Amino acid sequence: MPGLLPSKSIKVTYNLNPPLSIPVPANLPKSNAHSYPVTISASTDKTDTLKAGNAFYRGLKKSLDAARNEVGEELTTWRDLVGKAELNKEPKKADDDDEGGEDTVGEEGQT
């Protein structure tokens, strides 16, 4: 009967620095670290490298899916929080000097 062997792990770490103007809830960590073990089925036939490779990639896919889902949910919460704060900011005014700069270059080139 094949068992499960932990072999490797996927580690995801992030440290966010949101703008100081954004109120951060106490239950929302700015940094976090996760580890997702890649577990493969132990093969009774050590000579079948194709089966062993397939088992490894199945385990890897499961670990990547778990990492993507958990970290994705956490970062989506941050995106929503920061995005709402950014929507409430005043839009930047266009700099009038930039618009005139293109016309001036064309006039300087002519004599």
Image (tube, rainbow, N blue to C red):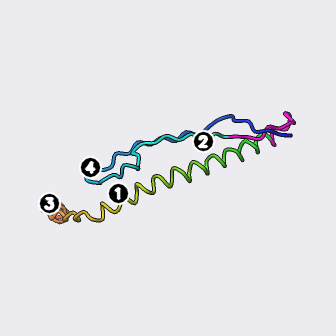
Question: Which amino acid, mark 1?
Answer: Val
Comes first in the chain, label 1 or label 3: 1
Please provide percent x and percent y for residue 18.
33, 49
Mark 1, residue position: 82
Comes first in the chain, label 4 or label 3: 4
Contact between labelled residues 3 and 4, with CB atoms less than 8 Å apart: no
Of all residues, the one furthest to the left in this rendering is: 111
Comes first in the chain, label 2 or label 3: 2
> Is disc 1 surrounded by few (<14), some (14 to 19) or many (20+) residues within 10 Å?
some
Comes first in the chain, label 1 or label 2: 2
Disc ID at residue 29: none
Q: Which residues are magenta?
A: 39-51
Contact between labelled residues 3 and 2, with CB atoms less than 8 Å apart: no
Say whether residue 12 is left or right of residue 55. left
Mark 4, residue position: 20
Question: Which amino acid, mark 4?
Answer: Leu
Question: Which amino acid, mark 3?
Answer: Glu
Please provide percent x and percent y for residue 107.
15, 64
Which residue is drawn at the image coordinates 34% and 63% (left, top)?
A: 84
| Distance Cα–Cα, label 1 vs label 2 | 27 Å
9 relative to 104, above or below = above
Mark 2, residue position: 36
| Distance Cα–Cα, label 4 vs label 2 | 32 Å
